[in-house]
Image (tube, helix red, strand yellow):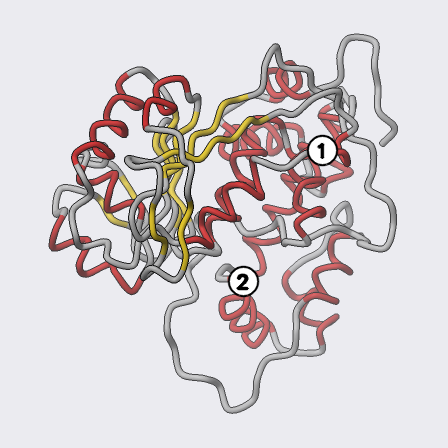
């Protein structure tokens, strides 16, 4: 969630890859159009807000036949290129279908296997994880799928380590999102992984979508409607984001919201699927990443400004979230030599 959506976005560090990252989206008979829309919105649109000379991603829809009917046949797509598009893709996206217990066609499964075998990144959205499991990519791996289909998934694919109540799972070369809206969470995670937190936050502002939901947060599974709906957390989150460098505690957040810590914990669980402390820590790590990306080299300064206390804690948190040390993160996402972005 941005600090103030009424203000212009802060500058982002330009990145100039030698060519756009190629994304192929498989559109099969009955594919969910919302998830296809998420993929094209995330990776197929121009990004003038980034101020780059060219696109970072190049997206192509493809399918086993030139024309497919989507989602119970309400409408279709014609003129699709064939699945050979998959053979030059850097990332393959497989959306879900409402009839996910029906096996995918052999052409689609072969395309998924080929992409994975040659080192492409393979991503499923919602029940697209069924196709990845059918192709054998998920055996012995952690995976996510929509909570309504968790029992069917376990029954059909017992060798997969299903995590039924998370938004998405990142296994490196294979990533799986849960429900349809979690496709946006996973897509922003890929932007962050590929290009850093600063650019990912700019994209999230363009989408008007919160950037603070990480994969380990819980899906919004069916639960009884409370007698008194919880008030929105948005004002509290915005207030806390402006004070991440201060020694904020869960008690401070509860006091600001004029509720008990226990009530605040319930509201965070219900609305964000996480705890107040986990959210606060995640926001501090995101701020630390942005400071490093903008050119701040002093780890003690980054740690202090992000509210992480010490450089040692910053190193541990950054490595846990990104798998990189601060110096490696700076080399990958920081400004070019001699360039510093105002912080």
Quadrant hosting residue 53 = top right
**Residue appearing at x 53%, y 22% in the figure:** 21
Q: CA distance from mark 2 to mark 1?
A: 22 Å
Which x, y percent locates residue 64?
28, 35
Quadrant hosting residue 104 = top left
Q: Quadrant of the C terminus?
A: top right
Q: SS for tag 2?
A: helix
Q: Which residue is mark 1?
A: 290
Q: Earlier in the sequence, mark 2 or mark 1?
A: 2
Which x, y percent locates residue 158?
12, 47
Closer to the camera in the image, 288 or 179: 179
Which x, y percent locates residue 46?
68, 34
Closer to the camera in the image, 305 or 57: 57
**Residue appearing at x 85%, y 55% in the figure:** 6
Q: SS for tag 1?
A: helix
Q: Is residue 111 above or below residue 18?
A: below
Q: Looking at the image, how many numbered discs can be counted on the residues?
A: 2
**Residue appearing at x 47%, y 54% in the figure:** 34
Relative to residue 157, is residue 334 drawn left or right? right
Closer to the camera in the image, 17 or 239: 17
Decide: few, some or many residues near mark 2? Use Cα within 10 Å; few <14, some 14-19, many ≥20: some
Q: Which residue is mark 2?
A: 272
Relative to residue 23, is residue 302 drawn left or right? right
Quadrant hosting residue 236 = bottom right
**Residue appearing at x 36%, y 37% in the figure:** 26
Q: Is residue 229 visible?
A: yes
Residue 335 bears which disc, if any? none
Decide: few, some or many residues near mark 1? Use Cα within 10 Å; few <14, some 14-19, many ≥20: many
Closer to the camera in the image, 181 or 189: 181
Relative to residue 117, is residue 36 drawn left or right? right
């Amino acid at each position: 969630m941005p600090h103030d959506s009424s203000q212009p976005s802060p500058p982002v560090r330009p990145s100039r890859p030698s060519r756009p990252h190629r994304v192929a989206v498989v559109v099969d008979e009955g594919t969910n159009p919302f998830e296809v829309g998420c993929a094209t919105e995330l990776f197929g649109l121009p990004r003038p807000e980034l101020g780059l000379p060219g696109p970072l991603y190049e997206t192509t829809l493809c399918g086993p036949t030139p024309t497919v009917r989507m989602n119970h046949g309400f409408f279709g797509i014609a003129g699709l290129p064939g699945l050979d598009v998959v053979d030059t893709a850097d990332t393959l996206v497989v959306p879900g279908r409402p009839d996910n217990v029906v096996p995918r066609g052999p052409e689609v499964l072969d395309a998924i296997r080929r992409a994975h075998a040659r080192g492409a990144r393979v991503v499923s959205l919602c029940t697209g994880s069924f196709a990845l499991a059918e192709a054998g990519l998920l055996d012995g791996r952690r995976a996510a799928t929509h909570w309504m289909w968790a029992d069917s998934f376990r029954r059909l694919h017992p060798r997969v380590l299903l995590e039924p109540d998370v938004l998405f799972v990142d296994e490196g070369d294979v990533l799986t999102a849960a429900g349809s809206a979690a496709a946006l969470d996973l897509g922003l995670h890929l932007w962050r992984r590929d290009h850093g937190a600063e650019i990912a936050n700019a994209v999230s502002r363009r989408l008007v979508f919160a950037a603070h939901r990480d994969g380990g947060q819980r899906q919004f599974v069916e639960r009884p409607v409370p007698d008194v709906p919880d008030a929105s957390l948005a004002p509290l989150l915005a207030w806390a984001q402006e004070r991440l460098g201060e020694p904020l505690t869960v008690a401070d957040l509860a006091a600001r919201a004029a509720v008990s810590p226990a009530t605040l914990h319930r509201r965070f669980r219900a609305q964000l699927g996480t705890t107040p402390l986990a959210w606060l820590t995640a926001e501090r790590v995101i701020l630390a990443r942005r400071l490093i990306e903008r050119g701040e080299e002093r780890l003690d300064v980054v740690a202090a400004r992000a509210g992480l206390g010490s450089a040692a804690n910053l190193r541990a948190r950054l490595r846990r979230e990104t798998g990189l040390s601060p110096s490696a993160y700076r080399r990958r996402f920081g400004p070019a030599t001699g360039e510093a972005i105002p912080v």
